Image (cartoon, grey):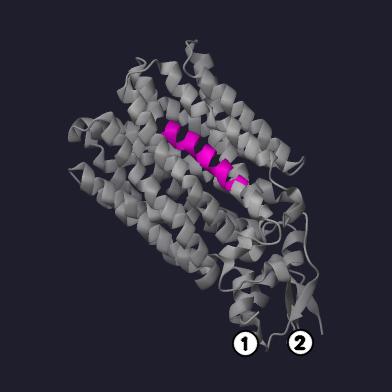
Amino acid sequence: MRQLDVHKIADEAKFNGFHGVILAWCALIIIFDGYDLAVAGIAMPAIMQEMGVSATQAGFMASSALFGMMFGAIFLGTLADRIGRRRVIAICIVLFSVFTAAAGLTTDPVTFGVLRFIAGLGIGGVMPNVVAEMSEYAPRRMRATLVALMFSGYAVGGMLAALLGKAMIASYGWQSVFYAALAPVVLIPFILRSLPESMPFLLRVGRFEELKAIVARIDPSYRPLATDRFALPAEDRSDKAPVHHLFSEGRGFSTVMLWLAFFMCLFMIYALSTWLTKLMATAGYSLGSAMSFVLVLNFGAIVGALGGGWLADRFRIKRVLIGMYLLAAASISLLGQPMPALLLFIVVGLAGASTIGTQIVTNAFTAQFYPLAIRSTGLGWALGIGRTGAILAPILLGVLVGMALPLELNFVAIALPALFAALAIALVDNKVSAYEHHEDVSAILPDNAEALRKA
């Protein structure tokens, strides 16, 4: 009779085709997610002109999706730990694809805002689930790198939105880039077939044969036996009330600090993604040139995510994050200063690397902080609370843009949150992190599913 610790098996596995499939699907989902999120900011100048809305009204229109993302991250992230991650990912894809496309049919800001709110539920809900999926199955020695590589799809989606915007909006109207968001729906059956379910969830519901098949894919040398017993550390087992675990075992203060860091970082990201095109157009650049800055911003995000993930797997991820946040404060502050075009593009790239890229590394840091059983919940609540910063950013920047303040003051307002985020990360207690601490496992008998459900 063998006792198998599935957490240890996943941690010590060698990267293989199974991990590659998870990485590919999760990255593709994030690309779609990033596109749906960025498309409103890309189209905003055209939407404002056609609907005749002010900068302040446009800020509220942009924030409607972010408001939905807050609820989606909290509730759909938590729901995944109860009904299974694959089902929730499929629900999210339907929400953000169908309702983003539907927003292209609208002619007034209120209907647009309502549909973008519903789309936001899916946009926000899918993020914690795909991060949890990748971090659960990624080998420990390269976990931050793989999560960062997967989440760089977010920046690819932003770049795709900018490219399609430049190619389509002038010829076919802003609606065309919204209609394109419907495409991911056709991939849902393939995603459900390819992505594995969460191991703690399979243990809780007694689907041991499915779990054996997954373990065999993680470790091809494994040969399942009828007498195999599976186990998880007690801290990694699911129960029906995962939220309270965010504040148990000494995690409460660090949870709040993570929420603060997410709030500040997401404020910067959505301020830039929503208003960078408009601010650069106001500074005298053509709409096409202003969209080029969005491309550079997202290209920088990919470099920042991959570079930050690589550094995080080789050095203390906490120190890497603090350095990235300080770089964000410096680079964003410089955006409002006059400089040669080439240098400006470099600074925009650094801003993307140290905001979007830093958020991706922060997701990896948070995924490592919480045990497997509450990973989707922990990420979901952090992203959900952080969305309040994302909601406020377009509104606040819309007010500042409407006041016609000097350009540099707008960018200083975006940069200041980076300093608070750096402080929050510095205060997270590594001693209570799941990455640093695991309890001894206790075995779970395959024929004792009912007892497990009560655990």
Farthest residue to the bottom: give it.
447
Q: Which residues are magenta?
A: 257-274
Q: Which residue is disc 1 drawn over?
A: 450
- At label 1, counting other C-alpha atoms closer than 10 Å, the crowd grade (few under 14, some 14-19, many 20 or more) is few
Q: Is residue 300 above or below residue 248?
A: above
Residue name at image x 56 percent, y 47 percent:
259
Instruction: Residue type at mark 2: give it.
Output: Thr
Disc 1 element: helix
Quick one: quadrant of the C terminus? bottom right
Of pointers 1 and 2, the one earlier in the residue sequence: 2
Disc assigned to residue 144: none
Rounded to the nearest whole Å, what is the CA distance between mark 1 and mark 2? 18 Å
Residue name at image x 70 percent, y 36 percent:
320
Q: Are marks 1 and 2 in contact (CB under 8 Å)?
A: no
The image quadrant of residue 209 is bottom right
Q: Nearer the viewer, residue 113 or 163?
A: 113
Q: Is residue 377 above or below residue 392?
A: below
Q: Is residue 399 magenta?
A: no
